[in-house]
Image (cartoon, rainbow, N blue to C red):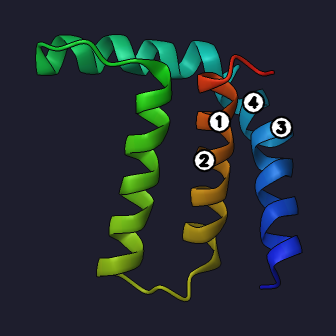
Amino acid sequence: MKRDKCLNTAADLVCNDREETHGAADKSFGVIADLWSVTLCLEIHPEQVAMMLTQLKQARIITGDASVADHWVDLCGYASLGCELSTKGD
């Protein structure tokens, strides 16, 4: 997959498909952060959720089939969501 297709696919997913399915990232990642905070007994922030989800995708690339484009697309998507959450969408 060419880089522009990877980025465009990630953009389409995080801006359209996934938001329609999972709701707004700030709310969804906020809820995930709250749940993880209780589970781990420490404060997790929404942008940290995005960072940890990028690590999940990295682990799948390392331990699985690195040629699966979905891993790379999701990695781009989670990184873009982390950027938006940490910069407050500026």
Look at mark 1 in the image and give the residue it sits on: 83
Look at mark 3 in the image and give the residue it sits on: 15
SS category of the residue bearing label 3: helix
Is the residue 34 above or below the residue 78 in the image?
above
Measure the alpha-carbon separation of dots 3 and 1: 14 Å
- Is disc 4 in contact with disc 3, using a CB cutoff of under 8 Å? yes
Disc 4: CA contacts within 10 A as few (<14), some (14-19) or many (>=20): some
Measure the alpha-carbon separation of dots 4 and 3: 6 Å
> Quarter of the image holding residue 51?
top left
Question: What is the three-letter code of the residue carrying label 1?
Answer: Cys
Q: Is residue 48 left or right of residue 5?
A: left
Relative depth, front residue between 16 and 82: 82
Disc 2: CA contacts within 10 A as few (<14), some (14-19) or many (>=20): some
Look at mark 4 in the image and give the residue it sits on: 19
Question: What is the three-letter code of the residue carrying label 3?
Answer: Cys
Q: Nearer the viewer, mark 4 or mark 2?
A: 2
